[in-house]
Amino acid sequence: MRIKVYFLILVLFLLGLGGILIYLSRRMLPLHLYFVEGMILLILIFLFIFYRKIVKPMNTIGSGMELLREQDFSSRLSMVGQYEADRIVNVFNRMMEQLKNERLRLREQNHFLDLLIQASPMGVVIMTLDEEISQMNPMALKVFGVRLDDVLGKKFSQLYSPLAAELSIIPKERTAVVRLNDSNIYKCTHSSFIDRGFKHSFYLIERMTEEVMKAEKRAYEKVIRMIAHEVNNTTAGIISTLDTMEQALSEEDGMQDICEVMHVCTDRCFSMSRFITRFADVVKIPEPNLSLVDINELVFSCKRFMEGMCNDLQIKLILECDSNVGMVRLDASLFEQVLVNIIKNAVESIQSIKDQSNRQGEVIVKTIHPACVEVVDNGAGISKDIESKLFSPFFSTKPNGQGIGLIFIREVLSRHGCTFSLHTYNDGLTRFRILFP
């Protein structure tokens, strides 16, 4: 029971005792009666003082405990005029002030960290204890190409994203460099922090595409220029010597076979020179001359250009244009070369399995609103191991490929500010998707 209840019981007991004394006053002497009544009055006064000095301060302290429980750190207790109780009130008020300041500091710190995370140029993904996504900053949403509402509460395995699949296999406290099928390269770190005694995982995603591409380009530019210089100078000398010898020997009898061999060697030198010139052309891609172009007309023109080759190989080339797609700023001549290369790769992919499959080969060129071009084929497809290497310099899956086509495509699309991806989906179709800015 509370002290207040004991106090009320004692007051009631004394009042009852006073009533009994009044009832018995007929038998008592007046002097004794006054004395007893005076004692009862003194006890009541003492109880009143006791209430003010003990019970009321304890009620005040109890109210303070309620404020703590409700986490109301802005309220303060009033002095009760009792020395010991006022000391407790002072300590309590100072504690409440410190708690208020600490809460304010933590709120400001959390607000600052939240602003920092939201403005960070690195993608930040914070997970729950169940490894579900609890927070993504704008950069992470841009990298994944999703909306926040679509990913909250989901695991990486539930997202249809190559990057999510790569993140899910990175061990804790490790960093990995991930190259995706859209030529983008990311430095991904899987780490954790402790909140309320529990470890929460988070991922940092740093885009390194531009830096790596510049480093790669500087490297292969230097190598190509050096090789082209040496090869062209050497072949020029060899061709000149062979021509001279061929002319001199052609006048001699019985030298036709030797002259024919020299002619073959000359052709081979020219072929080698053209071969190395193609590599040099990748380095010399001009800056795009941007102008407003009707993307549907451009795609239709490319389709007409490639129709003859597709018909000869008995491959259907289908065009699906969205009339809502309007004008796009691009370099028409460069983009035509890109589209021709993509369609040519799709045709070659179909040709590689044509003998093994009875299905009709199809290449579908689509334009999609607001500004997207997609080339779809039902060819051999691309394995996961090859996907990450597709846009690497001079990588090719073709026996006689030079790995130049996709490098050219990457350079042109990057200079246009486009985002693009090349991926074989679960339906077996391979899609090269280009999104304009």
Image: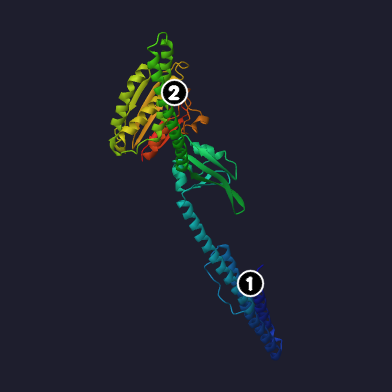
The residue drawn where x is 44% and y is 38% is 217
Element marked by disc 1: helix
From the top left corner, tell me how far across and down residue 288 is, in percent. 33, 38
Categorize mark 1 by other alpha carbons within 10 Å: few (<14), some (14-19), many (20+): some
When the figure is inspected, residue 196 is found, relative to residue 7, above or below; the finding is above
When the figure is inspected, residue 74 is found, relative to residue 384, above or below; the finding is below
Q: Which residue is mark 2?
A: 349
Q: Is residue 387 left or right of residue 297?
A: right
Of all residues, the one furthest to the top in this rendering is 254
Between 366 and 183, the residue placed more toward the observer is 183
- Give the quarter of the figure containing the C terminus: top left
Element marked by disc 2: helix
Look at label 1 and name its amino acid. Lys
Q: Please give the label number shown on residue 4.
A: 1
From the top left corner, tell me how far across and down residue 86 is, in percent. 61, 76
Between 319 and 74, the residue placed more toward the observer is 319
First in residue order: circle 1 vs circle 2: 1
**Quarter occupied by residue 436:** top left
From the top left corner, tell me how far across and down residue 230 is, in percent. 44, 31
Q: Please give the label number shown on residue 350.
A: none
The residue drawn where x is 58% and y is 63% is 69
Mark 1–mark 2 Cα distance, whole angstroms, equals 91 Å
From the top left corner, tell me how far across and down residue 240 is, in percent. 39, 23
The residue drawn where x is 70% and y is 91% is 31
Look at label 2 and name its amino acid. Ser
Residue 43 visible in the current orientation: yes
